[in-house]
Image: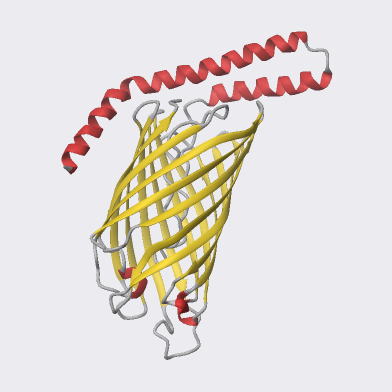
């Protein structure tokens, strides 16, 4: 079955690869040239000095965008809080297609994935492989827009099916508000998960988290080859039956990426997490330097690599607690490849590897995960 799916996706990819690049480039170029022609016509008929200045500014932006076609930098994945908590939203996949701000848009995502060690990072429980299938949908709609700025909102829902674990499926609901002005983009988002499988305790009980939170994401491009991002998220997590783990989590990060060439876009960043749990045994701080590398293969595909060195410390005074004196050092590698399959289809292949070295016995581990996301977007762009 897996081989058949891979074969089918390969056929779709090669069938669309030859035509999607030129069609998308020509469509976008035609839109920009039509708008430029209309503005030029208005310019010759316009008597207002203020209007002339704004029209000339937009014409310059169009000229820069035409020059910049094809060398856009891939978006880095949204940073998760930590694999140890498993209470955050899943790592976002790169956006599939350019959003048309004038119309509503519906996207459907199917994400099968595999993790060979899903729970050991949490409480030292035995290694257990897990098969997950995420089915999600997102509906976006414009609120206000002109030729300089766009404001739109979206609502989403996700169902995760867990194979091999009884009563382990969960839902996540989210809302987003996105504002764009020139090279600046600001996003606010909130999410809620009534129950989410987070860990399995030593006595075999499932740890189901009730989590809610909000976040803010700011992106800007100071010049044609530089991308800067700042990110913050707050989580409130409750564990019925395991109240000592209840936590308030603050997570902040930032990174900068520079394009030397389409095939070489390196970047650096930093992440900070502070987990304020009720029990001192689960309180920790985590500081993480981040290294990024992206490559764009024409206008059809991109390859993105991220390496993180996590440094987690538990500040515990009670020597009787199980995490007393604990320090973790984690090497975390994540890679994803985005492939355009046409005007309505987008495929993302992803995989990750984590090696954790802990000062506490039975807390060191390694884990591997891999999967794919197939996204359908309507209407086609």
Residue 381, x across and y down, in percent: 46, 25
Residue 231, x across and y down, in percent: 56, 53
Work out whether residue 17 or residue 193 is closer to the camera in this orientation and state it: 193
The answer to which image quadrant residue 202 occupies is: bottom left
Can residue 232 be seen here? The reply is no
| Left or right, 212 with reference to 366 | right
Residue 241, x across and y down, in percent: 41, 76
The answer to which image quadrant residue 360 occupies is: bottom left
- Please determine whether, in this image, residue 350 is positioned above or below residue 319: above
What residue is at 47 percent from the left and 61 percent from the top?
81
What residue is at 71 percent from the left and 24 percent from the top?
57
What residue is at 35 percent from the left and 74 percent from the top?
123
Can residue 207 be seen here? The reply is yes
The colouring scheme, among rainbow, by chain, secondary structure or one colour, is: secondary structure
- Please determine whether, in this image, residue 266 is positioned above or below residue 378: below
Work out whether residue 203 or residue 73 is closer to the camera in this orientation and state it: 203
Work out whether residue 64 or residue 1 is closer to the camera in this orientation and state it: 1
- Please determine whether, in this image, residue 228 is positioned above or below residue 285: above
* Count of numbered marks: 0
Residue 174, x across and y down, in percent: 50, 50
| Left or right, 319 with reference to 220 | left
Q: Quadrant of the N terminus?
A: top left
């Amino acid at each position: 079955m897996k081989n058949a799916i891979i074969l089918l996706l390969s056929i779709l990819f090669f069938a669309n690869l030859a035509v999607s690049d030129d069609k998308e480039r020509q469509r976008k170029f035609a839109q920009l040239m039509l708008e430029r022609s209309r503005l030029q016509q208005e310019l010759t008929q316009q008597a207002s000095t203020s209007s002339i200045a704004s029209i000339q500014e937009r014409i310059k932006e169009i000229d820069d965008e035409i020059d910049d076609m094809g060398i856009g930098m891939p978006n880095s994945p949204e940073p998760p809080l930590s694999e140890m908590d498993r209470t955050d939203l899943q790592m976002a996949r790169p956006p599939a297609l350019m959003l048309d701000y004038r119309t509503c848009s519906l996207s459907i995502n199917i994400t099968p994935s595999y993790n060979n060690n899903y729970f050991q990072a949490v409480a030292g429980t035995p290694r257990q492989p897990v098969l997950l299938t995420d089915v999600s949908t997102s509906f976006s709609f414009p609120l206000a827009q002109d030729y300089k700025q766009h404001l739109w909102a979206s609502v989403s829902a996700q169902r995760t099916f867990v194979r091999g674990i009884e009563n382990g499926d969960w839902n996540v609901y989210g809302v987003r508000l996105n504002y764009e002005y020139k090279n600046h983009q600001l996003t606010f988002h909130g999410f809620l998960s009534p129950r989410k499988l987070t860990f399995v305790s030593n006595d075999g009980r499932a740890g189901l988290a009730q989590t809610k939170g909000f976040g803010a994401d700011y992106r800007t491009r100071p010049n044609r080859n530089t991308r800067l991002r700042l990110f913050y998220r707050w989580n409130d997590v409750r564990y019925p039956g395991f109240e000592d783990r209840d936590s308030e989590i603050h997570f902040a990060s930032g990174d900068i990426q520079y394009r030397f060439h389409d095939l070489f876009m390196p970047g650096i960043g930093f992440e900070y997490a502070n987990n304020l749990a009720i029990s001192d045994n689960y309180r920790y701080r985590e500081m993480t330097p981040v290294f990024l590398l992206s490559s764009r293969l024409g206008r059809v595909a991109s390859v993105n690599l991220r390496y993180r060195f996590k440094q987690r410390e538990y500040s515990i005074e009670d020597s009787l607690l199980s995490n007393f004196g604990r320090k973790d050092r984690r090497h975390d590698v994540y890679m994803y490849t985005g492939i355009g399959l046409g005007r309505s289809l987008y495929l993302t292949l992803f995989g990750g590897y984590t090696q954790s070295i802990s000062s506490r016995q039975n807390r060191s581990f390694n884990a591997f995960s891999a999967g794919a996301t197939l996204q359908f977007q309507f209407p086609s762009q």
